[in-house]
Image (tube, helix red, strand yellow):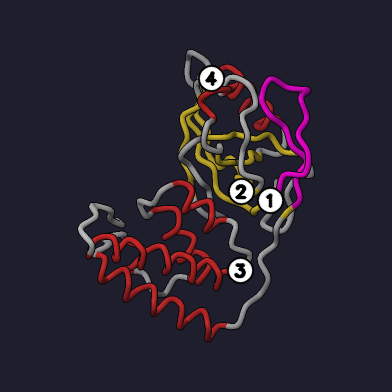
């Protein structure tokens, strides 16, 4: 099975319009389309890895085909699966590692891609601590109720990734967060997004972060 430092060179892609998976985070999914039922069956017989990707705007015109996706995604390991009587599945993925799509292949009804893992380098603790403190202040101002805020003892990678995945943000914002190459960049980018929402609120916008 895959680890955070090792994902298969070719992974099945599961593109969705509003879901972004982050490393180490769980993601429950209900699989009902025939092509993706086969994807899950094949994954369960193999390395149990599925690559989550975000569909680009305009995907509706070619959903049954291969609409464009953002080039960076996150591979997830199927941790739990439930096969339903009619062929559908309930599964839980756990994010393993970010990747960049290098090429797509068409030998299956679902999408397959050759991917390049995107490792996240070790980082100094002090800047991360300062970035977390700033983010917590912004979340307090925003009135965020996420349970992650109440667990400041979490390691930085789990803390910031959990916030990125759990906060109610536009999918394109979450994609930008996923594409951050370091945890510090992800912290700073998330802080900027929250500051933008706070500014919109002060100007009378209905935008909110929860």
The residue that mark 4 highlights is: 33
Q: What element carries label 2?
A: strand
Q: Residue 99 carries which label?
A: 1
Which of marks 3 and 1 precedes in the sequence?
Answer: 1
Please state if 22 lies on the left or on the right of 150 as rendered: right
Q: Where is residue 92 in the image (x, y as percent from the top left)?
A: 50, 40
- Considering the whole magenta stretch, tell me its main secondary structure: strand
Q: What element carries label 1?
A: strand
> What residue is rendered at 61% in x and 68% in y?
182
Q: How crowded is mark 3: few (under 14 residues within 10 Å), some or many (20 or more)?
A: some
Which of marks 4 and 3 precedes in the sequence?
Answer: 4
Q: How crowded is mark 1: few (under 14 residues within 10 Å), some or many (20 or more)?
A: many
Asked whether the beta carbons under mark 1 and mark 4 sit within 8 Å of each other, the answer is no
Question: In the depicted view, which residue is nearer to us: 58 or 55?
Answer: 58
> What residue is rendered at 45% in x and 83% in y?
130
Which of marks 4 and 1 precedes in the sequence?
Answer: 4
Q: Distance between the residues labelled 2 and 3?
A: 15 Å
Q: Distance between the residues labelled 4 and 2?
A: 21 Å
**Residue 162 lies in what quarter of the image?**
bottom left
Q: Distance between the residues labelled 1 and 3?
A: 14 Å
Q: What stretch is highlighted in magenta?
A: 100-116
**Which-is-in-front pick, marks 3 and 4?**
3
Which of marks 3 and 2 precedes in the sequence?
Answer: 2
Asked whether the beta carbons under mark 3 and mark 4 sit within 8 Å of each other, the answer is no
Q: Where is residue 164 in the image (x, y as percent from the top left)?
A: 45, 58
Q: Which mark is residue 182?
A: 3
Please state if 91 lies on the left or on the right of 112 as rendered: left
Q: In this view, does 12 lie above or below 167?
A: above
Q: How far apart are marks 1 and 4 (CA)?
A: 24 Å
Which of marks 2 and 1 precedes in the sequence?
Answer: 2
Q: Which mark is residue 74?
A: 2
């Amino acid at each position: 099975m895959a680890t955070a430092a090792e994902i298969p060179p070719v992974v099945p892609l599961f593109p969705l319009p509003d879901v972004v998976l982050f490393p180490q985070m769980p993601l429950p999914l209900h699989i009902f389309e025939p092509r993706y039922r086969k994807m899950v069956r094949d994954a369960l017989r193999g390395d149990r890895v599925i690559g989550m990707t975000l569909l680009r705007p305009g995907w509706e015109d070619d959903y049954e085909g291969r609409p464009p996706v953002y080039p960076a995604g996150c591979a997830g390991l199927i941790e739990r699966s439930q096969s339903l009587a009619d062929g559908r599945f309930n599964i839980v993925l756990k994010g393993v590692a970010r990747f960049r799509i290098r090429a797509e292949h068409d030998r299956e009804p679902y999408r397959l891609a050759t991917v390049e893992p995107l490792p996240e380098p070790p980082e100094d603790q002090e800047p991360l601590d300062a970035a977390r403190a700033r983010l917590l202040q912004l979340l307090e101002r925003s009135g965020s109720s996420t349970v992650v805020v109440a667990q400041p003892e979490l390691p930085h990678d789990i803390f910031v990734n959990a916030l990125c995945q759990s906060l109610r943000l536009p999918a394109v914002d979450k994609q930008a967060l996923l594409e951050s190459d370091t945890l510090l960049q992800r912290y700073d980018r998330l802080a900027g997004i929250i500051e933008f929402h706070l500014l919109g609120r002060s100007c009378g916008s209905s935008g909110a972060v929860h």
